[in-house]
């Protein structure tokens, strides 16, 4: 895939099983967001195909994709005075075949999505007045209201403090375990990626340079090569997962 003849992704090949939790990591500009948009059908590859349940994603209509795959963008803004409850109900649009108005089923699904994300208490509050972490949980609730089988997220914890980072990934972990929701997330936080994701792929210059379980992918030599900086890795648990820290040279 290219933007204005500038190649962004090449030789990408991967396979996901239902119920997997995949993290896409890599430096800025490595193609993480572009890959998410291609997997979601927003962008079309110049060569190759994306198959969803063995069917070419390019043959799906946009509404049909939205019934199966939900995308939570890095930033969700509203320039209108919508309440959080109304934003979540927007996720039901793909299921409104012949009506512009929601029915009881739509309201029930939206309420369940808000309960799952602990956002029901925000239902009557204006979306613009919520904090960053609260908005992100509402955005996830809106995606869940689509009743998808796969949820894609672009930097879901960007600019959030550790409290909201923990909340977001605990919600995603629960959805993955209890509902077998397939989750694909692009992210910069290597430690959250190692802790929650079943599998990681590392992108560099638009290519996959590593793919596998976090214990295999998160190794010092590979990460230093990909990120072009020195790191320290600490094995965190019996599964071999590692925490990663940049190595600082501080002059006393």
Image (tube, rainbow, N blue to C red):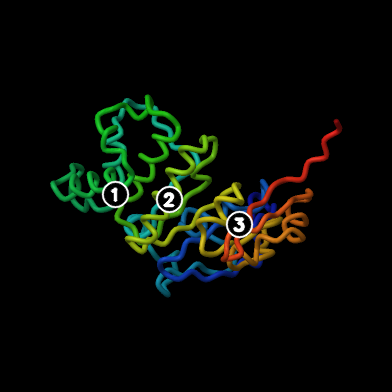
Is the residue marked by circle 1 packed among few (<14), some (14-19), or many (20+) residues within 10 Å? many
Image location (x, y in percent) of residue 8: 66, 55
In the image, residue 208 sits, relative to residue 141, either above or below, namely: below
What residue appears at the point 20 percent right and 48 percent down from the top-left corner?
106
Image location (x, y in percent) of residue 243: 63, 53
Q: Which residue is mark 1?
A: 145
Q: Which residue is mark 3?
A: 236
Cα separation between marks 3 and 2:
31 Å
In the image, which is nearer the foreground, mark 3 or mark 1? Answer: 3
Cα separation between marks 3 and 1:
35 Å
- In the orientation shown, which residue stands out farthest toward the front? 238
Q: Is residue 131 left or right of residue 106?
A: right
What residue appears at the point 42 percent right and 75 percent down from the top-left corner?
54
Viewer-nearest residue: 158 or 165: 165
Sequence-earlier tag: 3 or 2: 2
Viewer-nearest residue: 114 or 73: 114
What residue appears at the point 29 percent right and 30 percent down from the top-left corner?
83
Quarter residue 87 falls in: top left
Quarter residue 174 falls in: bottom left
- Whether the residues at callouts 1 and 2 have beta carbons within 8 Å, the answer is no
Cα separation between marks 1 and 2:
12 Å
Image location (x, y in percent) of residue 34: 57, 52
What residue appears at the point 67 percent right and 61 percent down from the top-left corner?
207
Which quadrant, please, contains the C terminus? top right
Q: Which mark is residue 71?
A: 2
Find numbered disc 3 in the image and state the secondary structure of the residue it sits on.
loop
Sequence-earlier tag: 1 or 2: 2
């Amino acid at each position: 895939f290219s933007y204005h003849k500038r190649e962004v992704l090449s030789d990408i090949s991967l396979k996901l099983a239902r119920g997997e939790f995949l993290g896409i990591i890599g430096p800025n500009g490595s193609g993480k967001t572009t890959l998410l948009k291609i997997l979601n059908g927003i962008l079309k590859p110049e060569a190759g195909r994306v198959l969803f349940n063995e069917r070419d994603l390019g043959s799906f209509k946009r509404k049909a994709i939205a019934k199966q795959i939900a995308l939570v963008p890095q930033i969700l803004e509203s320039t209108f005075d919508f309440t959080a409850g109304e934003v979540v109900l927007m996720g039901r649009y793909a299921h409104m075949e012949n009506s512009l108005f929601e029915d009881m089923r739509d309201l029930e699904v939206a309420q369940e999505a808000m309960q799952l994300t602990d956002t029901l208490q925000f239902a009557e509050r204006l979306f613009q007045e919520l904090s960053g972490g609260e908005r992100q949980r509402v955005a996830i609730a809106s995606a869940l209201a689509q009743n998808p089988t796969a949820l894609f997220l672009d930097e879901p914890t960007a600019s959030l403090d550790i409290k909201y980072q923990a909340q977001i990934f605990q919600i995603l972990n629960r959805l993955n375990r209890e509902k077998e929701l397939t989750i694909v997330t692009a992210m910069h936080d290597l430690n959250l990626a190692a802790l929650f994701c079943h599998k990681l792929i590392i992108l560099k210059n638009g290519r996959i340079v590593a793919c596998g379980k976090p214990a295999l992918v998160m190794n010092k030599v590979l990460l230093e090569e990909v990120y072009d900086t020195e790191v320290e890795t600490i094995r965190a648990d019996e599964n071999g997962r590692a925490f990663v820290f940049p190595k600082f040279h501080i002059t006393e």
